Image (cartoon, rainbow, N blue to C red):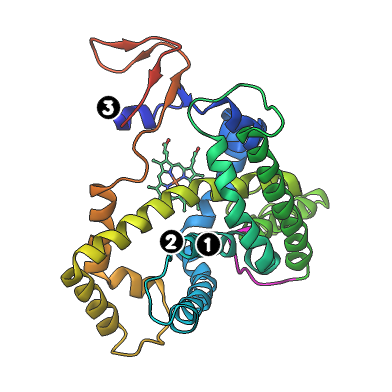
Amino acid sequence: MARKVFNAPAYVKPCVVDVAQKLLRPTNWVFLDGKAHVDYRKGLNGLFTRQALGTYLPGQEEVYYQYFEKFLKISQEEHKGQPTPFMPHFRELMCAVSCRTFVGHYISEEAVKKIADDYYLITAALELVNFPIILPFTKTWYGKKASDMVLDEFSKCAAKSKVRMAAGGSVTCILDGWVKSMIESENYRQKIAKGISVDDAGKPDVVLREFTDFEISQTLFTFLFASQDATSSASTWLFQLMADRPEILDRLREENLSLRNGDRSVPLSMDLLENMKFTRAVVKETLRYRPPVLMVPYLVKKDFPITDTYTIPKGAYACPA
Ligand code: HEM
C-alpha cells in the first residue's frame, strides 16, 4: 500500500504545512508537477549516482577530520576529560558535512556555523500546528528569516560555482556537478544553433535548461532541509545504540580497521564503504529499528482506486507510515 502511494504522482502530491511553501518558496521544485518538475529531476538524478557520490567523499572526510580534532581539543584541553555535552557539536558537524557536500568551499565556515545555529528556527517554524500567516516575532517569522539567510548564502555559492566551472574547474560538490551539466548542455545547444549535426555536437546524457542562482539555491535548500533532520535523527540513534552496545561498536571498529589493513589514514572510497558489510548492516538495522521519517503525508488530487474494493476520495490524506 505504501509503495502504491509513493509511486502514484498522478493521484497524490506531498502535503506539507502551509508555512513550508513560504519557507522553501512556492516555486520550489518539490512543489512542481509535470514537465517543470521533470526538468529539475533529470538534472539532479546524476548527482546521486555511485560515481558522483564517490567524488564528494574527500570533502566530507576533510570535514570529519576537522571536527574530530576539535572534539579532541574540547575534551582534552577545555573539559580536561570531564563529561562534556557533545550533541550541539555533533549537530554542527552534520550541518557542515551537508553544506560541504552541497556547496563545497563556496561557503565560509562562519556561514556554516550560522546555518547550523539558525536551523533550529526553521524546524520550529514547521511545527504541525501553526498560524497560516507570518506575524512578526513569531516562530514562523524567525523561521522565514533563517530560510532567507540560507537561500541568500546558497545563491552566492551558485554564482561562484558558475564562474569557476565556466573556467574549467573540477567537480568538488553537488552544486559543481549540476552547474557543469548546465554548461555542457548550453555548449551543445550553441553547437546545434550553429548548424553542427547532432552526432558531431556531442550530445550530453541529459540536456538541461539554465537554472538561475535563486532556482539552484532553492533546490539546495531542499537538500539541506531533507538531509538535516533525517540524518541527524539517524546519527543520534546510531550513536545511542552503539553506546548501549559496546560489543557491536567494537565489531564496527574492527571491520573498519581491517578493511584498511590496520592503517587509519586510508581515505574513504565507495569500494571501501561497500565492503563494510557489518557496518552497513548496523546502519540499515538502525534505520529499520528507529526510522527517521515516520510518515510521509500525501494529499489525494483525484479519486485514487488503491485496491479493487476501495477508492481513496479526492481531498483525503494518504499517509504511508
Ligand atoms: C537517513 C537519511 C534519510 C532518510 C531516512 C530520508 C527519507 C526520505 C523519505 C521517506 C522521503 C519521502 C519519499 C517520498 O515521498 O516518496 C524523502 C524525500 C526526499 N529526500 Fe530524503 N531521506 C534521507 C536523507 C536525504 C538526504 C541526505 C537528501 C539530500 C542530499 C535527501 C533528499 C530528499 C529529497 C530531495 C526528497 C524529495 C524527493 C521528491 O520530492 O521527489 N534525503 N526522504
> In this figure, which residue is indicated by the disc labeled 3?
1
Q: Secondary structure at mark 2?
A: helix
Give the residues in magenta.
168-176
Magenta segment main secondary structure: loop
Image quadrant in which the C terminus is located: top left
In this rendering, the answer to whether 222 lies above or below 5 is: below
Q: Quadrant of residue 130?
A: top right
Amino acid bearing label 3? Met
Residue ID at (26%, 16%) = 307
- Whether residue 35 can be seen here: no
What secondary structure is found at the residue carrying circle 3? loop
Between the C-alphas of marks 2 and 1, the distance is: 9 Å
Cα separation, mark 1 vs mark 3, equals 37 Å
Magenta segment includes 58: no
User: Residue 46: x, y in percent?
Assistant: 53, 54
Can you tell me which quadrant of the image ligand 1 is in?
top left
User: Mark 2 vs mark 3: which is more N-terminal?
Assistant: 3
Question: Looking at the image, is 308 positioned above or below residue 199?
Answer: above
Q: What residue sits 19% from the left and 74% below the top?
A: 251
Callout 1: few (<14), some (14-19), or many (20+) C-alpha neighbours within 10 Å?
A: many
Using the rendered image of the protein, determine whether residue 93 is visible from the camera's viewpoint. Answer: yes
The kind of residue on which mark 1 rests is Glu
Residue 141: x and y in percent read 67, 34
What residue does disc 2 label? 87
